[in-house]
Image (spheres, rainbow, N blue to C red):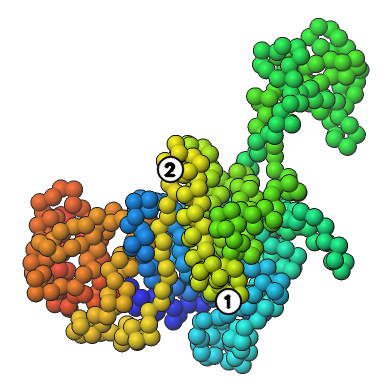
Amino acid sequence: MLKETLKANETVRANDAELLALREHFAGCFTKEGAFDLKAFENRIRDLVAVTEEGYQLDFLGKNYARLLANEETETVIVPDEAHNAKPENAKSQNVYISGDNLDALKHLLKSYEREVKCIYIDPPYNTGSDGFVYNDNFKFKPEELARKLSITDEEAKKLLDFVGRGSASHSAWLMFMYPRLQLAKSLLRDDGVIFISIDDNEQANLKLLCDDIFGEQNFLANIIWKRKRGRDNSARWFSKAHEYALVYARHVDSFDTHFLELDEETKKAYKNSDNDPRGPHRDLACWARGTQGGVRYEFITKDGVRFSERLWLFSKVNMEKMDQDNRLVFHGDNVYRKLFLAENAGKIPETLWDSVSNAANAADEIKDLFGAIVFDTPKPVPYVTEMLKIATDANSLVVDFFSGSATTADAIMRMNAKALGKENRRYILVQLPEKCNPDSVGKKEGYETIDQIGQSRILKSAAKIKAENPLFSGDLGFKHFTLAKPSGEVLEKIEDFDPKSSVLATQNMLDEFGVGTVLATWLNHDGYGLTKAPEEVDLEGYKAYRCGKHLYLVHPLDLNHPSKKVVKALLEKYENEKDFTPDKIVLFGYSFGWKELEELDTNLKKLKVTRNITADLDIRY
């Protein structure tokens, strides 16, 4: 389970992902020695892409180190909260809450959710100097190891390790913290996916350059200005700061379609039907062009012979004539208007100034209403996140928030689904580091030890409130909870030293530390089944195996009651006698089976391929 990961991480380099993409699509640009031929690559793309010798990019201390962290596999496992997940409201839920470092969580999520996420919203630390952000690195590289991975000198590696090891809140430290997370987040997005990132002036300029680097400047959609403060702060030294930002980037700008927002009641009242047009209320919009609007110059004659002098029109002559034939033109003196019917208005295109989409004070009120106290200092209001979801998601979209905080995103999604009364079923995956609540904080005084406990509690409290307010709603108000955990030092040492031909008892504590549920949850996600799909139990003469899709998982250790011959015999009989039993990959927890048992199973499976034309590969994981 982890042995392969530990081995793979030994050889990871900062540019592995880029080189893999180049090898896949431009194999002919590599020499037989493995060197990349830049000239050959330039010749391949010159007819489609303008090649330039000059460039502009964001550089900061530790950028290659951050890329290395994005490429390394996580050495954590996924521990299910079995008691919580078994509750009726959670057992079939498609929502997920993960307690753990979001860098590890993103690496796990990519195994099952790559290119499946429609919208990501994050509210990362702003690096204000008072928000508690300090870059804390728990990766233990030796200078010579890091020098090899980054192709730098040992001295440069020592300086970099000193920087990441001492903890910093500098701009470089913040960028190094954000870079790998955004790099991985991009891979989660669908082609028509979009990411919203809340930020303020402390890092907004740097974040814009960072996102240009990762998502591509051409995929920038907007820099939303959100008025977060109700009143004016006259005690401010220079200006009363009333706003924050939300940077918006698409995965592929040509694939993303902005959803129009619903018309407000005041706008709807502007549509009248004084001429009793059977097509309903309409607004009359000018057809002539002003000097700044361009336009097409011609003389226009209506179907009834009314002549309008030559001028600049907003529409071509053909389109004007079509609207006239369709009785869509309205004439007032020397002016021509077209009818825009209310039924045809798709809504309002979103603007970049959000000056009336709730505020920070309202967000605090929402928390107080649920908890009876403001247990979280900097929540975002539900309407603010809802506005983003309206713009960027569909009825069944998957949404990810990996800086979950007080879990506003989950609250907003549940409320949107409830309002639609079963017609919409957005799902969420939230991630929150279980960081300790400040000893003097309201959250701590209210009994919450960690921030993720506050987030989970908010979901539970909000779900209960939504259910009470919407008794007819029977949608998903639950969530499955998982914690990311790293093996103890003793277990890691045993993993590294384990010899598959040795006694199974040598590392039996793998299951003692994590349990079967953890092994299964980690493997199911790794194999693309996600975090909400429950495996089917398979009985092999009393030995419990687990099946999901084309995979059959054997995790439990063999014992006197379930000897290998008995289990293998039962497995082979299932293949031979049950037509719908067709898993093509048998995954075994290597520590639970002796070498002889593994050889016996492998031999019999090979026989099945010949005698029964049944193909099932053995996958032994440690």
Q: Above or below — where is 100 with respect to 474?
A: below
Residue 472 image offset from top left, x and y in percent: 44, 36
Residue 207 image offset from top left, x and y in percent: 69, 65
Q: Residue at x 41, y 74 (%)?
A: 485
Q: Above or below — where is 214 with respect to 319?
A: below
Q: Above or below — where is 465 with respect to 52?
A: above
> Callout 2 environment at 10 Å: few (<14), some (14 to 19), or many (20+)?
some
Amino acid residing under circle 2: Gly
Depth order, front residue of 406/157: 406
CA gap, disc 1 to disc 2? 37 Å
Q: Residue at x 17, y 56 (%)?
A: 614
The picture quadrant where one finds residue 598 is bottom left
305 displayed left or right of 511: right
Q: Secondary structure at mark 2?
A: loop
Q: Residue at x 13, y 74 (%)?
A: 559
Depth order, front residue of 355/308: 355
Closest to the camera, between mark 1 and mark 2, is: 1
Q: Secondary structure at mark 1?
A: loop
Badge 1 vs badge 2, beta-carbon distance below 8 Å: no
Q: In the rendered image, is residue 528 in sight?
A: no
> Callout 1 environment at 10 Å: few (<14), some (14 to 19), or many (20+)?
few
Q: Residue at x 24, y 63 (%)?
A: 553
Q: Which residue is mark 2?
A: 475
Quadrant occupied by the C terminus: bottom left
48 displayed left or right of 312: left
Amino acid residing under circle 1: Pro
Residue 320 image offset from top left, x and y in percent: 77, 20
Q: What count of labels does the image hold?
A: 2
Depth order, front residue of 516/51: 516
Q: Which residue is mark 1?
A: 439
